[in-house]
Amino acid sequence: MLNDQAIRKLIEENDLITEYIDLDKQLQPSGFDISLQSIEAFKGGGAVDFSNKERVIAETQPLKPDNEGWYHLEQGCYKVVYNEAVKMPTDVAALARTRSTLLRNGASVGTAVWDPGYQGRSSSLLVVHNPAGIRLKKNARIAQLIFYHTGEVEKGYSGVYQNERIKKP
């Protein structure tokens, strides 16, 4: 696992993470807090198969925060999009864990692996378990990326999500 010094070096020298809000606040002893850009509600079903030939990504609809930037969420499932974009080296991967404050309020973030070579602004599943719901403010730190060395991979990530939500020059 990479510590704060190694993560800072990769951020400053290799743009590991960009578009963060406050490097000193988000950089943690063993990870990096990622923050909420937006929330989307699921509008339909999806489909997953082995080869991805029949894959269907569920449609979503962006939710709007109130005038003070708060999202008022009922119990259920949502898609969250992060502020931060990552540019993973081909010898580093990351996993994300829900921040404990979110867990203590009855919500969790479900994530996948940030593969070596992946670049983009990711999204994850937010599950509000609390029957009373939860309020999340735009830019809230909701998950922490934990980075680790994999050793150099033969081929970095090249899937459909490469460069997702990244503005092309």
Image (tube, helix red, strand yellow):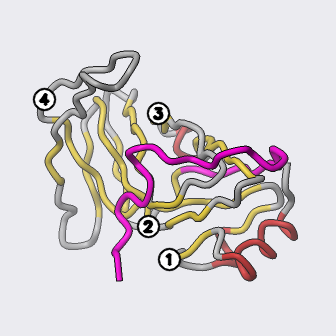
Residue 90 disc label: none
Name the amino acid, label 3: Gly
Residue 117: where, in percent of width, then height? 62, 55
Question: How far is the residue under mark 2 from the one under mark 3?
Answer: 22 Å
Question: How far is the residue under mark 1 from the one under mark 2?
Answer: 6 Å
Label 2, secondary structure: give it.
loop
Q: Residues within 10 Å of mark 4 (few under 14, many from 20)?
A: few
Question: How far is the residue under mark 3 from the one under mark 4?
Answer: 24 Å
Question: How far is the residue under mark 3 from the one under mark 1?
Answer: 28 Å
Reply yes or no: does residue 159 show up in magenta: yes
Q: Earlier in the sequence, mark 1 or mark 2?
A: 1
Residue 83 disc label: 2
Name the amino acid, label 1: Glu
Name the amino acid, label 2: Asn
Q: Residue at x 85, y 67 (%)?
A: 6
Residue 19 disc label: 1
Residue 168: where, in percent of width, then height? 34, 76
Viewer-proximal residue among 124 and 150? 150
Residue 55, picture quadrant: top left
Residue 118, picture quadrant: bottom right
Residue 139: where, in percent of width, then height? 43, 67
Label 3, secondary structure: give it.
loop
Label 4, secondary structure: give it.
loop
The boundaries of the magenta stretch are 143-169
Which numbered mark, 3 or 4, is in the foreground of this view? 4
